[in-house]
Image (cartoon, helix red, strand yellow):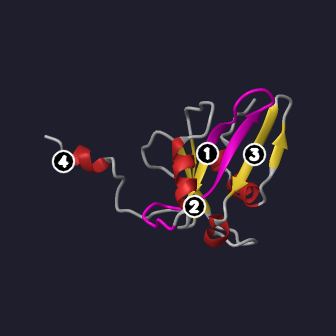
Amino acid sequence: MVFCDALWDGRFRTALLEAISGGRKFAGSHGELRAVPTRALKQLCPPGETLPSSLMKAEQSNTSLVYGDRLVLKFFRRLEEGINPDIEIGTFLTEKTTFAYVPPVAGRWEYAPAAGVPLSMAILPGHVRTQSAAWSYPLRTSP
């Protein structure tokens, strides 16, 4: 028996983004997996365009995929019932305001159990290029 982490497979990474673009839903025996786009996705990745993808190698608390220099799909490792605050606040700022100082949220993955509250699985914000992770700054400057 061989186990493989599908996130290392470029075809799988492409399928994840295409599912969000298409607003796909996947029914299971106990609930539904939903790929949910926002209006910002069409601006960041026009329909039919394929972006190169890779697994982000930076040290972090989540698993992230980078699509070109435009999008990051961040999977949450700790899943809880309800909408993740990053998704809730980011989507509000993206869709209900003109606030331009945070990356726009282009989509998300969520799981909706047949009985219970949906839970957030991943967020798809716009990619912000930086020289280093913000977390490295306080580590460099602490006494």
Q: What's under tag 3, amino acid-wise?
A: Arg
Residue that label 3 marks:
34
Position of 121 with respect to 127 (left or right) is right
Q: Position of residue 104 (x, y in %)?
A: 54, 62
Q: Specify the label residue 96 is tagged with.
A: 2
Q: What's under tag 1, amino acid-wise?
A: Ala
Q: Quadrant of the N terminus?
A: top right
Look at discs 4 and 3 and give the one toward the viewer: 3
| Sequence-first disc among 1 and 4 | 1
Residue situated in front as seen by the camera: 124 or 139:
124
| Sequence-first disc among 4 and 3 | 3
Q: CA distance from mark 2 to mark 1?
A: 21 Å
Q: What's under tag 4, amino acid-wise?
A: Thr
| Sequence-first disc among 2 and 1 | 2
Q: Specify the label residue 98 is tagged with.
A: none
Q: Position of residue 59 (x, y in %)?
A: 42, 44
Residue situated in front as seen by the camera: 121 or 84:
84
Q: Which residues are magenta?
A: 98-121
Q: CA distance from mark 4 to mark 3?
A: 42 Å
Q: CA distance from mark 1 to mark 4?
A: 31 Å
Give the secondary structure at mark 2. helix
